[in-house]
Amino acid sequence: MKQVLIIDASPMFREFLKEKLAAENVSVETAQGHRDAFTKLISQLPDLLILDIENSVDDMMDFLDKKRLDPNAVHIPIIISGPEVSKEKVASLTQYGVIKYFTKPIKFDLFFESIGRILKLSFSMDTTPCVLEIHLNKNIIFIEIAQGMNREKMSLLKYKLTEFMDNHRLDNPKVIIMMTGLSLSFVDGANLELLFDNVLADKRIDRKNVKVLSLDSFTKELIAGHPEYHGIEVVTNLSQVLNDVVEAGPTSSIQELISDQILTSTNDSNDGSVEMRFYSDSGTAGDGGEMNAMAPGQIPLKIAIVDDDAVVRQVMQATFGAIKAQCDLFASGSEFLQKFNSNTYNLVILDVFMPGISGFDILKILHDRNNTVPIIVYSQAAQREAIIQSLSLGAKTYLVKPQKGEVIIQKALEILNGKI
């Protein structure tokens, strides 16, 4: 049986790793602190060390020096997860047996791919396409699920939620699970149960504070048929969520509520240990935090601008040109739909009030096609109904014209980086 020693990992990261490794019949030991770690290292001589660093690699140099000087331990490979460091620093760690260095938050699938290569094991991974994103605003945790249900991400969710609550000292959070794009049946029952069981695993989450935004009848039937889910409410439109869980001040407008409380994350102080996005997810760019891996080439963003106002189209093209994005301009909804497919664009900027095929029509058509390309609605309409309808049909955010260019770029980058 293969053996792994996990050193100084946070509770969330440690328990998640133990569960996944144990499922593959890998023996796992943990250690906290340099002395405990080195004692266990030389007594067990594991096949792999996983070292989780909170602040600085320099804090572990004494341990690494002792390992390098011990003839029995020197050849044991190490995977490190830690803060961002220079490539030169990573290169200097190879003398200690460091094979991979993952910058936090790490991408789970890349991490286990590296573990599998070192241990010569093939980890079973659910490859179901799934977008599962989390953001936090005040005491509300938003969980968005699209495309499908991936059991790896459902399992990771339990630990990610606990990490969120620990980091932000949340004792009684409200949870909104947004899954309007999913159409499920009885074959998805086990995955739904895994989702709800993991959301409720932390006792700080009360069932009566969990809302599920879904148009799917099977989801509602499954919740109603499980006594342990009694109190979870399924709602079918965003306005119900706003009325039930979002605390509005006497002068708050619906635009302020949606922009400030639902679509804007306050979770910017700690991204946690592991990302909910995987490297293999569609649209994921970069090297996933894996130092020493060959990074793919940088591909410019491609953005569709759909607006019947020629001036707006030109301003948007100039705005995104500042970040070297390539823009295709469309003066009508029909022109856009003729060219659009999910592999063409990274982002769509869409007006809703246009002659012929409106932005609402486009949102509905793309929603019915299970579109995964994020859409920003950019419109002069500030009515509550227009905003709620756009978001219910899958728009990621709603911006009321006019906005400064830097505001639009910032919102676009937040969406593309998974912050919204």
Image: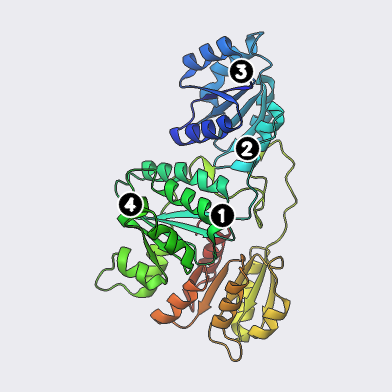
Residue 207, position as x, y percentages in the image: 33, 53
In the rendered view, does 152 fall on the left or right side of 198? right
Mark positioned earlier in the residue sequence (1 or 2): 2
In whole angstroms, how far apart are the C-alphas of marks 1 and 3? 35 Å
Q: Quadrant of the N terminus?
A: top right
Q: Three-letter amino acid code at disc 2?
A: Phe
What residue is disc 4 on? 173
In whole angstroms, how far apart are the C-alphas of marks 4 and 1? 24 Å
Circle 1/circle 2 CB separation < 8 Å: no
> Is residue 329 depicted above or below 287 in this figure?
below
Name the residue located 48 percent from the left edge and 64 percent from the top edge: 218
In whole angstroms, how far apart are the C-alphas of marks 1 and 2? 21 Å
Task: Label 3: state its secondary structure.
Answer: loop
Task: Label 4: state its secondary structure.
Answer: loop
> Is residue 204 depicted above or below 65 in this figure?
below
Q: Which mark is residue 111?
A: 2
Along the line of sight, which residue is nearer the eye, 42 or 413?
42
In whole angstroms, how far apart are the C-alphas of marks 2 and 4? 30 Å
What residue is disc 3 on? 46
> Is residue 61 depicted above or below 378 in this figure?
above
Mark positioned earlier in the residue sequence (4 or 1): 1
Residue 383, position as x, y percentages in the image: 40, 82
Residue 374, position as x, y percentages in the image: 58, 66
Q: Three-letter amino acid code at disc 1?
A: Met
**Residue 338 sits in quarter:** bottom right
